Image (spheres, helix red, strand yellow):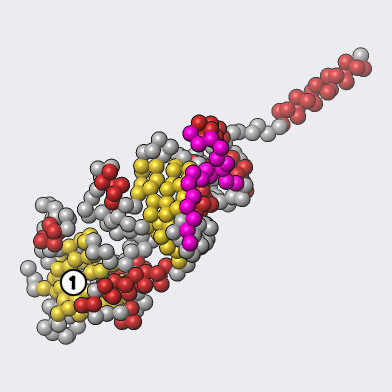
Amino acid sequence: MKKIFSAILYTSAALVLASCAKTVQPGPNDANKRFLEAWMQVNHPGITPTELGVYVLEDEAGEGTVVEKDGFAVVDYVISDLDGNISSYTNKETAKQLGKYDTTAYYGSRIWNTTEGTIAAGVSEILVGTKVGGRKKAIIPGWLMTYKVYDNIEDYFTPPQEKDKDKNSGTSTTTSYENAVYDFTVRDFTTDIAGWEIKKIGNYFAQNPSLDMTVADSLQLGFYYKQLAAPTDTTSFAKDSTIYINYTGRLLNGLVFDTTDERIAKDNGLYSASKEYAPVSVKWAEKAEDIKLGGSSVIPGFALTLWQMRAMEKGVGVFYSNLGYGASGSGNSIPGYAPLIFEIEIVAKP
């Protein structure tokens, strides 16, 4: 009887412990890891992944500056899925091959911020440490397409509810993303993006001697103005007065992204029959930052260019991206960290 009672107690205790045990839920990336390992065995056998799980397929060493964290890498790239379907690219040749070439779009190197939290963990792992001129082609697993960085691969597979306890974040770190193939070449690297842009502006001035400008001619950091035609009156515009302008906006490489001139629009593939090409109104203000173009606010560099001008004057403003569209750029025509050029002419009321 005593033995039977002991057995009952043991069995009951075991059931209680089992019911209290934590049920480990599989993370969303577990299945993808098994799939990717099997896919690699078939398509690229023998390649060992990095510590976080990136598979480097091709690695060509560069000879320039080493890419570091907390900087800016200038890169050309093609991004695709495992089936070779291209989703993003920087060169016009790829656009033409895909039948997607657009004369109004920007094609050229892009800038990747290497600061943690601004670039995918898997991309950072293979980008940081690469030298300028180097090229890499690698498979970035879906679990490394997050911007959250951990030291161990196991951390990317901890169930979401556990990971959220470790990080002060309302977003799970183990959300599953698609695997991607990154093929990129590093063209340049800097830790001073403003200085890098100003150097590009200086190169533009050197290539366009007719402007007779250098980076020493800045009116404020990253902003330059050149008068192309003298005003008829040097009196400042009154607050709340309305003036009219024609303008054309370009990148340093000459790509026109906006204009009020119909001929320029047609010559650069921008023409739209639904748009009226005519001078637009500008509402003057007490301060440059309050100037309105057609009732809307303008980027600081555009406003500063206007602020230098007087009646019937024509001029050109050149400025870095801090006074333009910053890190994000605008649409397909203006990439991030792009200096801009605006040629503006104040004209009579239409």
The residue at the far top in this view is: 1
Q: Is residue 172 depicted above or below 36 in this figure?
A: below
Residue 119 at least partly seen? no
214 left or right, relative to 281:
right
Residue under label 1, please give it: 344
Quadrant containing the N terminus is top right
* Mark 1: secondary structure: strand
98 left or right, relative to 50:
left
**Which residues fall within the magenta stretch?**
43-63
Depth check, front residue: 288 or 138: 138
Kind of residue indicated by mark 1 = Ile
Magenta stretch: residue 183 in it? no
Residue occupying the point 41% across, 60% down: 187
Q: Is residue 158 depicted above or below 242 in this figure?
A: above
Magenta stretch: residue 60 in it? yes
Residue 157, position as x, y percentages in the image: 59, 40
Majority SS type along the magenta span: loop
State the count of labels: 1
Residue occupying the point 65% across, 32% down: 23
Which image quadrant is residue 249 in? bottom left
